[in-house]
Amino acid sequence: MDHDAVPFGISGPRTHRISDLREAYRRYTEHGLVTMTEKIAAERAYASNDAGHFAWDVSYLVRAACIAWRATGDSSHLRRAANWAQHMVGRTDEARGVEDWRGRSAPVWSAGSRYTAGTAVVGEVGGVPLSLQAMAAGVRIERPSSGTAIIHTHRPDGSGWSSPEGSLLPGEKDYLPDVLARRSGMHSVLLRGLPAPVDLTSLPAGEHSLQEQIAPHLVHTGLIARALIEAAATIEDAARDGVTTEVEAEELYSAALRALLVHDDEIRTRSGQSWYVTPEDFPTRRLGLELPHNHVVDAATSFLLLGRRRGDAGLESLGTSLTRRFLKEITAYDVGELRHPWFYYPVDADTFSGVSRSAPMAERSVPPVARGEDSSHTTMRVRALLEWRAFDRDLVPDQALSVVALAFRRFFMARRNGMASLRWLPGDDNDSPRFGHSDTFSGAWGALAPWDATIKRRINSMAYRHPPTTVFGATVISAAEILALNTGTPTCASWDRTSRG
């Protein structure tokens, strides 16, 4: 989330008083938006989503600018939101003539080597290329013996990764493709192209450069689509007050829907429950398995809003279906069936429990990932939860939000040296390596204040003790959310005025 941050360099709140917090976070929000206006205009990295900046910076900045417009009435914020939204719409893969790893050019925003594995052909089996796929600049095959190999990777920053020694004989329990598949870290390697377990003793030792592949990631599409919808709704809100922009709201709504529909082939529906899975040829990990919660929540929100906007029951039903897993886990926690409601993958997913299968060969044996969600990604989920509530109070009842607020206090809130702080993972102790890492972007939690009498005080205490020190998407939207908390400003646009219930 903290990609290529810029130092903030402005003073914090003078006191704990609401008036001082409000003024400080107005300055933070405006300074962040101005700083990023200059950065986006000047740097090529913001001309595409290659390094993830549209998703993790510009989309959040659009939403922050919309909140700032509602909180201050300053039309410069509205113009920024509109212009940034149009900036992204005009720079899809299709608009830029860029092809993804499948050779397709679609109205989405692909990412490159920062998020998408590169590939190197290292041999062939039956005339079919055998390739290594890695999030790295290069790979090296070491052959310690005639029947084993070790794979090493290196990255541009000098860091690297090495696999355990694996067997090249298909009958061995430590067969190299399976050894690689069991290493779940993002910097690890997959061996692609095998039709079945075969003898790999002809695999040559040597160094290989990786060819970059690009791909549209659902989490990026969801983030960007949600921002386009927010900008469109805010433009419509402003027009009712006689404030106009040169950007047409409908253009933004349409771009959001086109982008989301590119991912149609990633949806699976089982027992009436829709969810996204990773395509088996996708150049990243967890092939053919369900995506984590944080990858899906903004897509769910976007389908709900677009369905309501267009009177399309199918889109709305899909959005509703995508909310169910998270909502069920909140209920399960409430009745004591789960130890907390913040797991990275859905608890009923194959990825959560692990899976053994015959195909794809690249990942026959996938170990379980039952870890909790980090306090950075939970902000995405709490924003979405509150938007689902605004959309339909029957979908997200008061009890669910009270439970989430209490779970936030219990599992993420902490104190270090007498100051309010955030754990990185649910239940981490104070010596955990990333304790406090997300202290400066906790603003999303403030919107839970109506369901917990202590939340506003707790978030404002963190806002006072941990003002942002750098500018990037997450700190700017958090600053805007804290401004909203202390001005009584809604954090989502006009569609919530027509919410059910």
Image: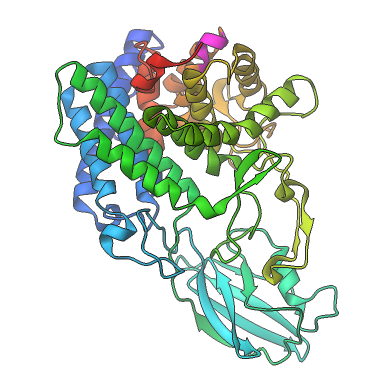
Name the residue at 28% across, 52% down: 46
Name the residue at 67% across, 32% down: 426
Image coordinates of residue 168 in percent, x first then y, are 76, 83
Q: In which quarter of the image is residue 441?
A: top left
Q: In this view, does 7 lie above or below 407?
A: below
Q: Does the magenta stretch include residue 310?
A: no
Q: Does the magenta stretch include residue 449?
A: yes
Q: Quadrant of residue 18?
A: top left
From the viewer's side, name the closer residue of 286 and 487: 286
From the viewer's side, name the closer residue of 200 and 238: 238
* Left or right: residue 28 compared with residue 194: left
Image coordinates of residue 12 in percent, x first then y, are 34, 23
* Residue 34 in sight in this render: no
**For the magenta stretch, what is the residue range?**
448-452
* Left or right: residue 124 compared with residue 51: right
Image coordinates of residue 112 in percent, x first then y, are 42, 62
